Image: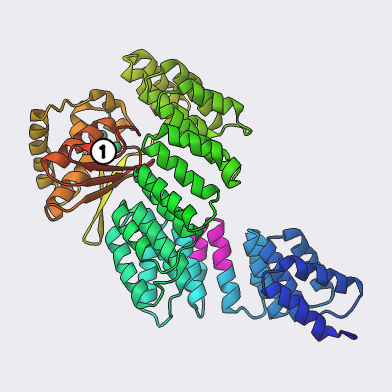
Amino acid sequence: MPERDTVSWNAMIAGYAKNGLADQALALYWERWSSGLRQDKYLVASVISACAGLLDLEQGKTIHASAIKIGLLSDAFVESALVDMYAKCRCIEDAQQVFKKMSKRDVVSWTAMISGYSCCGNVVDARQLFDKMPERNVFSWNAMVGGYAQNGHGEEAVRLWRQMQSTSIKMNNVTFVGVLSACASLAVLEQGRQIQGLVIRSGFVSDVVVGSALLDMYSKCGSVESARQHFEEMPQRDLISWNSMITSYAQNGYGKEALQIFEQMLQVGMKANHITFIGVLSGCNHAGLVEEGCRYFDSMSRDYFVTPIIEHYSCMVDILGRAGHLDKALDLIKNMPFEPNSTVWGALLGACRVHGNTKLGKQVAECLFKLEPENPGPYVLLSNIYSAAGMWEDAAKIRKFMKERGVNTKPAYSWIEVNNKVHIFYVGDRSNPDREEIYATLERLATEMKLAGYIPDINFVLHDVEEEYKEHLLLYHSEKLAVAFGLIRTPPGTPIRIFKNLRVCGDCHTAIKLISTIAGREIVVRDAIRFHHFREGSCSCGDYW
Ligand code: ZN
Ligand code: ZN
């Protein structure tokens, strides 16, 4: 252009900002700024949103200061952009200050504040604002539903989403992603299926992001068949969908299938990234494919140009440890280009438990006590390693040490979804209305299990939590109660899906294997670490967890 005026500069800068080229927008802005030409509210608002896109708080603050100087601060456009910028940069207090002083608050700035609070994990303040809003659009609902889902308030997310259904607001793909991720974390398969129905009716079935959220939901609910079926039916697949399918198989213990999908993905010309390889390696791990795991780990940077990050090392430690190569696993940790974190040491400690290595177990646990003194997991694991080796005194010492340090164990609980309702069980729980029938079912199963050779393993009385200490409670562990409830309340022959907040205990693992045969049911247990698919007396994890 031979001659440029305010409008042409603004149009170019805003054009960059709106199209995700925030860097270019800001570079051009500073060029114009040094030439001393007049700035208007549209220009300032668009460069502030460019800073928001880059999460560049420093530049944002500089532009905020210059906006004050030229008297543009009380403009609604600029204020709204500032609230959004500060909220996105997680400077919630600065966002609040601008928001409070705003001359005219619009739905955009209200929503920005809600997202800001949710990003900082403060769903209470987010909800307060949400309830106070004079009007809400789809973005405001999405911010709140998504905020609940991301912060582990799945039930609230689903409840609010149901409320949204009764409004006239049209849901978009982000709405479905939010509520589906809530269903995934709650592991409520029935509700997830109903939402899929609505996804189809609302015309989002070919949306690749919603598709991946559905896949993830099925996978986390332990229904890998539905995940696969959905995957096959997806009209379009991107890297996220392929990765979700690989991870789904891997998490559910179907290592060979995970590798098949990986090979298929390469065949269609999709490029693997680091998430793909976490899926591939954990698939090898969960299925005990040691050689394959080592091969993929060695080739990932050479053949696929993906540099291993600490998560990949952690998978490898798990793979080697599982196969009993504890020394190799330790060497790998010592030679890796990162400081080992708690996940890596945790993987090795788990392997020490499986292979009963008390000496290495002690060393590894001590590293973990330093890294995460508050985490009860390593104390419990080390104490279990000792008791399994008959070293009762050392086990008791660890328990005492844990108490002295004030480390608290979380109470174990399991849950199951039946008819859209989630039923929660604690050890020895008698609060369920069907308790008589649940306990009678367990007694009957215990007799049959004993006939099949089951001996209650009192080693695991020491597992997990204090409440689960006593031997007579072994039969009433939360996961057994949930399984019994499932047997009573779901049609014969259908799979039972239960979920536990901690690791499944060894005795329950043995018992559930037998129950799957006695009752002729597939039983799926998702615990804190992995999935167990029990079928005809054996488990997909191959007794390694
Ligand atoms: Zn148990
Ligand atoms: Zn298992």
Q: Position of residue 15 (x, y in %)?
A: 72, 77
Assign the N terminus to one quadrant of the image: bottom right
Element at badge 1?
strand
Q: Position of residue 309 (x, y in %)?
A: 58, 41
Is the CB of the residue bearing disc 1 within 8 angstroms of ligand 2?
A: yes
Front position in the image: 486 or 355: 355
Assign the C terminus to one quadrant of the image: top left
Picture quadrant where residue 318 is located: top left
Looking at the image, the residue that sits furthest to the front is: 267
Front position in the image: 341 or 251: 251
Relative to 495, 162 lies left or right: right
Q: For ligand 2, give the image quadrant.
A: top left
**Residue 73 appears in the rendering:** no
Q: How is the image coloured?
A: rainbow
Picture quadrant where residue 411 is located: top left
Q: What is the magenta range? A: 113-127
Front position in the image: 368 or 195: 195
**Residue 127 appears in the rendering:** yes
User: Which residue, given by chain and number where applicable, does mark 1 sit on?
Assistant: 539
Q: Any magenta on residue 122? A: yes
Magenta span: predominant SS is helix
